[in-house]
Amino acid sequence: MAEYFSYDELTWPEVAVLRRDVPLVLPLGSGYDLGRLAESLGDPPRIGLLPPVPYGWRGSPIEVPEPLLGAFIANLLDSLREGGFTRVYALTPPGLGLGLGAQAIRQPCEVLAPYRLGDEQRDKVVLVPVGHTEQHALHLPLNVDTVCIEAVAQGTAAAAPDQAVCLPVMPYGVSMHAQAFAGTLNAGGRTFEDFYLAVVDALVARGFERLYLLSGHGGNSSFLVNVVKYAGERHPQAFIATAFLYLSGAQGVAALEKYRLSKIGGMGHACELETSLMLHLRPELVDMSKVVDETDFIATPNYYMDWVEGGALVANPPWEDDTRTGAYGAGSLATAEHGKIWLEAAIAEKVLHVAEIHEQYMRRRARRQAGLG
């Protein structure tokens, strides 16, 4: 009987010591027969399941062209192979032409009904949360970005049910330091942009014209900005927006400053903030005995790292120049109490953004109807 484990709940050192011949499977959707999957893999003793891709294929809540979905999945599988894993697969519904060859295992799957968007929701802002699966130092699992932005997005939809509806979180994004630490995946920047522009196209084609792309991972942010720019040209009747992570506006930053214990440099990655959020949301996945604070970055007046990055310079130097463990910040100062406070502040920030998206959409539509646009 095969033992299944959740890949995204491991830390990067745990991924580093995995046998490279252990099968790793990335599902599209859910509801697969795991016994049948194990049999198709030759009944190995252990099988790693990656978090499922929640949409993109025919029959899912949002469909994109199969070549775009195939490229997105192929890049994620390539990330695993680049990490030395020799048995990596996508578990897909039958009948898809994704170009994955022998890497595709086909079975029927389920699509959960609550994730479907109905026509009656067209007057709401569609929240599109995007996380990632990447290293988060020694004390946190790979799924931090996904867990955090899912909580923020779902909390926003719950706080403003008449104004917003939330899609399932996408657990994959873009990392430009995938080789530095084990476990990190990478959908690829241009592929990521193409995929999410197609997601926007599909939603707008169905009449959803107010969209908010939310990211829990800093590496996604510049690419989502590009998606928004392209989409604004392509769909001038819609209002499509994004923002840098969360707690990045005036009120959010004020909440950080009020409660944070670390100085500038203490909130970057696997830091005081993210560790606090995880202590509140998923404490069983946090090992505070393994926290290593790393704040001694190569900082200059116009290039430094904190949650809301500052300075005029934009760069992407090797992470290993600055961190031995993958951390940027002071995770040891984290508390579950502050995690709860900051989550509530992040939700409040996003609720305000939703209201602004509605206002922008309605005022611009009125101006066009008056012949002024």
Image: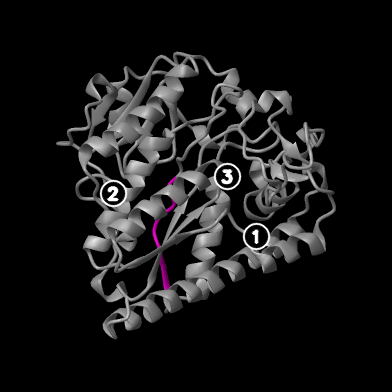
Q: Is residue 145 above or below residue 188?
A: below
Q: CA distance from mark 1 to mark 3?
A: 12 Å
Q: Quadrant of the N terminus?
A: top left
Residue occupying the point 57% across, 28% down: 177
Q: CA distance from mark 3 to mark 2?
A: 21 Å
Quick check: 37 left or right of 151? left
Residue occupying the point 53% across, 74% down: 159
**How many callouts does the rendering have?**
3
State which tag comes first along the sequence, 1 or 3.
3
Hey, what amino acid is under mark 2?
Answer: Ala
Q: How many C-alpha atoms fall within 10 Å of the one at disc 1: few (<14), some, or many (≥20)?
A: many
Query: Residue beneath label 2, please?
Result: 198
Hey, what amino acid is under mark 3?
Answer: Gly
Q: Is residue 87 above or below residue 291?
A: above
User: Which labelled disc corresponds to residue 218?
Assistant: 3
Query: Residue beneath label 1, please?
Result: 247
Q: Position of residue 62 (x, y in %)?
A: 27, 53
Quick check: 213 left or right of 152? left
- As drawn, the residue found furthest toward the front would be 372
Q: How many C-alpha atoms fall within 10 Å of the one at disc 3: few (<14), some, or many (≥20)?
A: many
Residue occupying the point 70% across, 36% down: 139
Q: How many C-alpha atoms fall within 10 Å of the one at disc 2: few (<14), some, or many (≥20)?
A: many
Q: Give SS at disc 1.
A: loop
Q: Give SS at disc 2.
A: helix
State which tag comes first along the sequence, 3 or 2.
2
Quick check: 299 left or right of 121? right
Q: Give SS at disc 3.
A: helix
Q: Which residues are magenta?
A: 164-170
Q: Is residue 165 magenta?
A: yes
Q: Position of residue 91 (x, y in %)?
A: 30, 33
State which tag comes first along the sequence, 1 or 2.
2
